[in-house]
Image: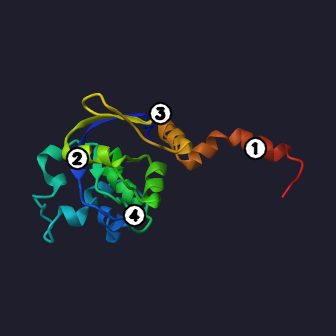
Amino acid sequence: MTPVKKIKSRTVVLPTRDIDTDQIIAARFLTTTTREGLGANAFHDLRYNLDGSEKLDFILNQPESGGCGILIAGNNFGCGSSREHAPWALLDYGFEAVISTEIADIFRNNALKNGLLAVVVNADTHRWLLDHPGAELAIDVEAATITLPDGTVIEFTIDGFARHCLTEGIDQMGFLQEHAASIQSFEENRSWKP
């Protein structure tokens, strides 16, 4: 994974509430164990008509959404079944962060474990973000802050372990591997054996 310390990007707004993981990446696209290529199918049924043509009214198909790395989502984003493919699809599409007033716990944990910053903000901040699509935000993961275009700084909460893994560009296995020498020393020197 790539370390995620600071994110500076424009936002794209998808205000629909209750977007579930099957809408993020439909079950029929879960036949792979790799992340590559999933972005093409992110929000597939919302983005494409049955004949495969783009739905021109869907926000991700509009030119102003190009290059936006921060998704402002409606309330209760990522609800539904647990699937790592959902954050994988968003990352492969090009999103670095998703912000909402409520993000399903399972999705949020999967996102953070896979390098996608999932941020919960208060209703006032969320309303401002929804009302200002394309706003340039600066997110500092280490400081747990979002800076709005006018300089207003919004604090958010992030678990210390998740912050460490994001900023170091490691997952849980990488964290354990960082401590391999200590683990081996403990196993060799403990007074009891399994």
Residue receiving disc 3: 142
Mark 1 surroundings: few (<14), some (14-19) or many (≥20) residues within 10 A: few
Marks 1/3: CA–CA distance: 30 Å
Q: Are marks 2 and 3 in contact (CB under 8 Å)?
A: no
Dot 4 and dot 1 residues touching (CB under 8 Å):
no
How far is disc 4 from disc 2 in space, using C-alphas?
Answer: 27 Å
Residue carrying label 2:
12
Query: Tag 1: residue type?
Result: Gln
Q: Earlier in the sequence, mark 2 or mark 3?
A: 2
Q: Amino acid at mark 4?
A: Thr
Q: Where does residue 128 sit, x and y in percent of width and height?
A: 24, 43
* Image location (x, y in percent) of residue 70: 29, 44
Does any portion of residue 94 appear in the rendered image? Answer: no
Indicate the colouring scheme: rainbow
Looking at the image, tell me whether mark 4 or mark 2 is earlier in sequence order.
2
Secondary structure beneath dot 3 equals: loop
Alpha-carbon neighbours of circle 4 within 10 Å: few (<14), some, or many (≥20)?
few
Sooner in the amino-acid sequence: mark 4 or mark 1? 4
Q: Which residue is mark 4?
A: 32
